[in-house]
Amino acid sequence: MKRTHREHTQATYEMSPEHILEVKDLHVHIAVDDYDLHAVRGVSFSLKKGETLGLVGESGCGKSVTSKEILGINPNNCTGSGQILYRTKAGKVLNLLELSRDGETYRSIRGSEISMIFQEPMTAFSPLYTIGNQLAEIVLLHDPKATKASARAHVLEMLKKVGIANPEKRIDQYPHEFSGGMLQRALIDMMLCCNPDILIADEPTTALDVTIQAQILELMRSLQKEFGMSILFITHDLGTVANMCDHVAVMYLGEIIEFGTVHQIFHNPQHPYTRGLLRSLPKMNQSREKKLYIIDGVVPLPVELPPCCGFHDRCEACMDDVCPKRDIPEFTVEPGHMVRCMLMEQGARKHG
Amino acid sequence: MDNVLLEIRNLSKVYDSKGVSVRALSDVNLTVMRGETIGIVGESGCGKTTLGRCVVRGIDATSGEVLFHTEDGVIDFLKATGAQMKKYRKDIQMIFQDPYASLDPRMTVFDIISEPLRYNTRMSAKEIEQAVDRIAEQVGLNKAYLRRYPHAFSGGQRQRIGIARSLILQPKLIVCDEAVSALDVSIQAQIINLLEDLQKEYHLTYLFISHALSVVRHISDRVMVMYLGRMVEFGETEALFAHPMHPYTQALLSAVPQPDPDISVDRIILEGEVPNPANPPSGCHFHPRCAYATERCRTEAPPLVNHDGRLVACWECGKCQGKT
Amino acid sequence: MKTKNGTPARKVQEKKSDKYYYASQWRLMARKFRRHKLAMVSTVVLLIFYLIAIFGNFIAPQGTEQYEGRYVNCPPTRVHLFHEGKLIGPFVYGLKTERDPVTYMAQFAENTEKIYRIRFFAQGDEGGEYRWLGLFPSNLHLFEAEEGGRVFLFGTDNMGRDLFSRVILGAQISLFIPVVGMLMTLVLGLAIGSLAGYFGGWVDTVIQRVIEVVRSFPQVPLWMALSAAIPKTMKPAQVFMLMTVILSLVSWPGLARVVRSKFISVKKEDFIMAARISGAPASKLITRHMIPSFLSYIIVDMTMAIPSLIIGETTLSFLGLGLRSPATSWGVLLQETNKLETIMFYNWKLIPMLFVFLSVLAFNFMGDGLRDAADPYK
């Protein structure tokens, strides 16, 4: 990642007092073999203290790239621009994009102030050390006052809290002796050791079984209540979003195409993509005889995209003289509910 | 010919490695009717994938029978002779979960789809070409792209290629092993509808293996729930989803997050993890996580009991009725 | 299923990647390989080496059996263009022998009164006859000094043989023994490894044990023991064959092991299962799906193994267990450097070492590039 190294001369930024994170007009380009992927195309959103924001979309929509950009952990072939404003625990507002990725400031934020859990918990642990060892390491790293003994006690207590049975024995076991669900719990635990302000959860339950997923979601909810952290929840699973999030941002081809409260998105979706997505899901409470709704076609690659609605060539309501030809502005449906679709302009709802 | 297509009888599979034997599948019985879709659900380690692979003879079952009803009478597919295999192999095909791993990246799409024809028929090159073109159109693949390699295609399109390959021999039964699980939501709907259309057109029978309960509910006529290698519940889809009888089925169904913030199910959160299949609990495998477990559950494995057409393996079946 | 595919962005994409979509595994690998600069340079270097070796008899001014007692241990001849400020094209001066006034050692010096032009595409002396690619008799050489003159680009050895010629003719042995040996290793390793990997069970166990036994012998002594058994009276061509056999007998277990483990891992792949379910017989499974799926890795392994075979051949010949004069290889040439005085007084005799070094390095870099390209689907 090419970032400017201006750590000492950083400009001062203003941020709404109730927000803890503001992403403004974020663009991320990925240099692939012989072309340039415009993976994130002008994403803006903000995260309030203690709330859960869902970033939803299908693979390739840029949701993961966005979240990794916040932590500055995208691979080196990615270039980000825009602003990512973050209020540190000390109350200072920083533009994370201006920090040096390996600099002291970023390292102190990563992990202790903004944490992340991943889809594959196995990859987050080293197979060579015991779980207890690795968790204690984190505690020691982020708490200068901790001793080896106190760190171990802390880890034991945490393992108990996240519901791992027999923690005295478990603490000395190796990652391969844990199941995916247990590892994910241990990982969440590891992240919470430092009491972060923001937890970024990138598909944390996708690789897990449903009953284990229910356990993990329950755990995240109760821990959020206890510690008051904000969660950025990244997933493609609309069911999980409906159950976990306060606000939802629907992404398509690197843009947020609809944003609102969870009720606005699920009960009054406006963008044809959001509507299509919701209608295409088989539901537990609908008649089985009905055919599933289909969104035709596939997600295109974001290469050399002209200004246009990214969804236009799969959209039933596409207006050929407008949608493929211009940038689509945001329209407000009602307070807090934003849609990026030209249908809103005319108030015409030809579809649905 | 009767209406039964396939009977699975006491099918078991034991994996032996380094002195540890894992019973992945124990004594599963199932009768499959022509043209129906049977959903097989369960969590990882429940044996659903092993079941599917044993049925297609992708792996060898340890014991049991897979009776296949053909024009020549009933044959045991697992013990079929060379000649019988030659004739009936093509009737039972499979669609895989991972659209990336299941296509040989070194072959063109045309070669992948036509490969089964080369082994099982004596078609001329021209006939093969026509057959592939026809099937490609049917599954929604652009004919112009058939000479490309799989890496040119997205996950959904690759799954269509896999479906075309499994269909080209005009099989009677297709085992769909998590066939839509790796796909994005909008693509998943495309493939589900395609599978339904193909079923109508060719009068196909599906064994639809999946952990995605809402998908299974949508596509299946009857559903079988598995836990640690055993069948715990089996019945008509609507009824089973509306009134699950086994405590495990109840927990499983309640755990599925609904895409609607207003639906708040009384979620049954199961304690603990699925036990290690190498060392399963005694008696009913589910008892350590079950709220209704009694002494009997700990010692004796419950048999499958028929409750008005529903098969349930639970000693306490009466107790937990009507709780969801 | 119809999609509207008319957007400009789509069209650009389609066009750009069309070639990529139709590219087979080998084309994709070539694409990736070309990006590895060092590997590309190494490949070019190796190509040049092999071309020189193939046309060695033409490029080398002397044949293997030619020697001149007058010019023993002569240092490299300097090629001049100007004589007393006048351009007369490439030429060499005559050589005269002098005695060092202190050590009384014979020394060669340029006799600037005698000028011998270098003629290109000239007929060689008696003894320089050869056959083009082993077929058409000829005595045409790339360059040759005029009658009476001598060009020794790399000097001469202690029998008065032109070292430049011998390095080139030695390349024919030193560069081809490893390749032929590798091919034999490939056949052995692939066959035995496939047996073990595909069938498993007791076949696998037996083969595994044999591999362990063969591999537990230290390589160099094993080579030495086997080579020492080659009768000294054998013709160079027979020695050549025997040496490749020896080298491959020692190196097949490594490859067989790799093949076996690849077989075992590829057996679990979904596309193999898919082929089996569609009725593919075992022979087709192996030849159409399994071997192609890891062939590229095997090629990488082989390329990486060639350097050790080059060194192996050099070592054996250096120790006098391989080829013997007048047949030549880089190892044979280096035999003369086993005395300290050689390095002190006749340091040009180390030149063959440079070629061993360069070719080993080039094979390693090329293997590196191949390894990066071996799985183009990642």
Image (spheres, coloured by chain):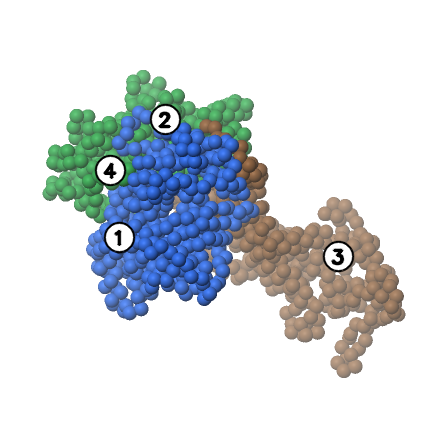
Chain colours: A blue, B green, C brown
Instruction: Say above or below: C82 vs B289.
Output: below
Q: Are marks 3 and 2 in contact (CB under 8 Å)?
A: no
Question: Total number of numbered labels?
Answer: 4
4 or 2: tag closer to the N-terminus: 2
Q: Between marks 4 and 1, how big is the CA–CA gap?
A: 21 Å
Marks 4/1 same chain: no
Q: CA distance from mark 4 to mark 2?
A: 28 Å
Nearer the camera: disc 4 or disc 3: 4
Q: Are marks 4 and 2 on the same chain?
A: yes
* Residue at the disc numbered 4: B263
Q: Label 1: few (<14), some or many (≥20) within 10 Å?
A: some
Q: Name the mark nearer the viewer: 1 or 3.
A: 1
Question: Is there a contact, CB below 8 Å, between mark 1 and mark 3?
Answer: no
Circle 1 residue: A224
Residue at 17% in and 42% down: B290
C118 vs C81, nearest the viewer = C81
User: Disc 3 sits on a residue from what chain?
Assistant: C
Dot 3: element: loop
Residue at mark 2: B196
Q: Is disc 1 in the same subunit as disc 3?
A: no
The x and y percentages for residue B71 are 35, 18
Q: Are marks 4 and 1 in contact (CB under 8 Å)?
A: no
Q: Is residue B156 above or below residue C223?
A: above
Label 3, label 2: how far apart the Cα atoms are: 75 Å
Mark 3, Cα crowd under 10 Å, few <14 / some 14-19 / many 20+, is many
Q: Is residue C89 left or right of residue B80?
A: right
The chain letter for the residue carrying disc 4 is B
Instruction: Identify the residue under disc 3.
Output: C60
Q: Identify the image quadrant of the N terminus of chain B.
A: top left
- Using a 10 Å C-alpha cutoff, classify the residue at mark 2 as few (fewer than 14 neighbours), some (14 to 19) or many (20 or more): some
Q: Amino acid at mark 4?
A: Ile
Residue at (24% x, 52% y) in the render: A225
